[in-house]
Amino acid sequence: MLKDVAFWAASRVECITMALQTITPKHRYLRRISIFVADYSIFVNIGGDVGQIAGDQTLRQWLELDRLLARLWESHSIRPRIKYNVCPGQEKAVIDSVARCLLPETTGRGIIDLVGIQ
């Protein structure tokens, strides 16, 4: 019985999205999806200026994952969690800003947990 799934985010998140698309109503015990982002630069991977990434493939992949995570919340009550390494001098406000850009639906609805790990 599958209860928790965890993924390591690589330079492309499309593999995570593809795997999560296989979740069906039969997975009724699944309650937690965790995505570990070991390298902050992979999480951002957008060159710093949010205004410059509108057509970027990385952004599209994160937005697709965001929509899927929101649907899984609605259909299965699965609360996703993004875990990231905290770098020295890194401000939580920067992470929150990037997360709002890459995951606007789940962050906007407050259905995702952003967890800094050391």
Image (spheres, helix red, strand yellow):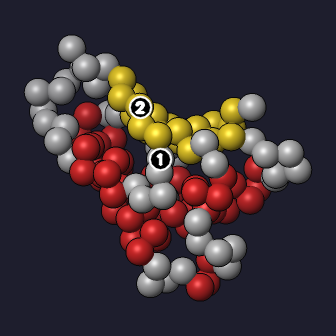
User: The N terminus appears in which quarter of the rendering?
Assistant: top left
Residue occupied by mark 2: 6
The reply to whether residue 79 is visible in this rendering is no
Tag 2: residue type? Ala
Front-lying residue, 88 or 92: 88
Q: Residues within 10 Å of mark 1 (few under 14, many from 20)?
A: many
Front-lying residue, 69 or 88: 88
Q: Residue 39: image x %, image y %?
A: 63, 48
Front-lying residue, 67 or 60: 60
Tell me the quarter of the picture where residue 100 sits.
Answer: bottom right
Front-lying residue, 38 or 102: 38
Q: Residue 35: image x %, image y %?
A: 47, 40
Tell me the quarter of the picture where residue 29 sits.
Answer: top left
The label on residue 78 is none
Q: Residue furthest right?
A: 89
The label on residue 9 is 1
Q: Identify which residue is drawn at 76% across, 50% down.
A: 92
In the picture, measured across the screen, residue 92 lies left or right of residue 33, that is: right
The answer to whether residue 89 is above or below residue 49 is above
Q: Residue 7: image x %, image y %?
A: 42, 37
Q: Identify which residue is drawn at 46% across, 70% down.
A: 59
Gap between marks 2 and 1 measured at Cα: 10 Å
Q: Residue 98: image x %, image y %?
A: 63, 62
The answer to whether residue 11 is above or below residue 8 is below
Tag 1: residue type? Ala
User: The C terminus appears in which quarter of the rendering?
Assistant: top right
In the picture, measured across the screen, residue 3 lies left or right of residue 60, that is: left
Dot 2: what SS?
strand
